[in-house]
Amino acid sequence: MPTHAALIHPETGQINVARLAEEVTAIRDRVIDERLRLETDCPHMRPEFDVRITSLGKLQNVLTSFQLGCAFWAMDLMSPEWWDKVTDYPEAERTLLRSEWQMFLKLGLVHFSFSAVESSLRAVMRAIEPTAHAGSTLEFKRLYDDLLLHRLSAPRPAHVELLDMAAKIRNTVHNNGIYFHKSGSAVDQPYKGRIFRFVHGKSPAVGGWPLLLELTADLVSMLVDVSRDPRIMAIRTEILDPGAP
């Protein structure tokens, strides 16, 4: 994943939107490759219905939408001619509005990626044991701890760490950049050998693009790993995606 410096345009000092789009496109292309490979390896899974495949399709759609958002950002929001032609916003407000669009893209990436993962893992748990966790409707943390540590062919503590981190970032994004927890306590969250501190009522330093891209890429890897786990692959019946047509 790129560093923050690598995503800064050398001339403007602003986010290099083209580079950001390239990084997201690379993640999306990997999702497509993994989805197609799974479809080929598992012809008994209907691509439009089985959550082992639709989970990747959902992430593909999120990343494609993000890519389109970057294109709008680069081609229109950075163009004075576009602003003059289609809006009546004065020059003084445009920098702020571009910043707000960037935040909108961050919100969409975090929320929709996490939503795709959560709905998919709930469906997998439901297929393993339909009555567990009240039909997989209870707190997501409780469910993914059980799934990833006890229900697969081997425990996946790194995936738990990933989801713990992603959940805290979604909590922060959901609260307009401020972390809140019902305990009111600060939390030191490990992630891939680093520690990120989340303080109740404060804005954590976790909103940069490099970290969000890294998390997104790791969520892709986790979904592939879960879908291809021998115990999940051994489920020959369809794991129906509740959102399937």
Image: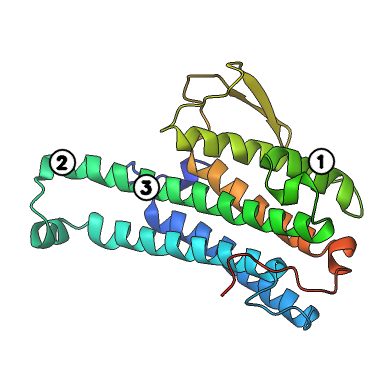
Residue at image x 57%, y 52%? 115
Residue 159 visible in the snapshot: no
The residue labelled by disc 2 is: 93
Q: Does residue 44 appear left or right of residue 49 in this picture?
A: right
Residue at image x 20%, y 58%? 79
The residue labelled by disc 3 is: 104
Q: Residue type at mark 1?
A: Pro
Residue at image x 38%, y 58%? 70
Q: Residue type at mark 3?
A: Phe
Q: How many angstroms separate mark 2 from mark 1 (CA)? A: 46 Å
SS type, badge 3:
helix
Q: How many angstroms separate mark 2 from mark 3 (CA)? A: 17 Å
Label 1 crowd (10 A; few <14 / some 14-19 / many >=20) = few
- The spot of residue 241 in percent (x, y) is 65, 66
User: Which label is found at residue 157?
Assistant: 1
Q: Which image quadrant: the C terminus?
A: bottom right
Label 2 crowd (10 A; few <14 / some 14-19 / many >=20) = few
- The spot of residue 17 in percent (x, y) is 38, 54
Q: Nearer the viewer, mark 2 or mark 1?
A: 1
Q: Are marks 3 and 1 in contact (CB under 8 Å)?
A: no
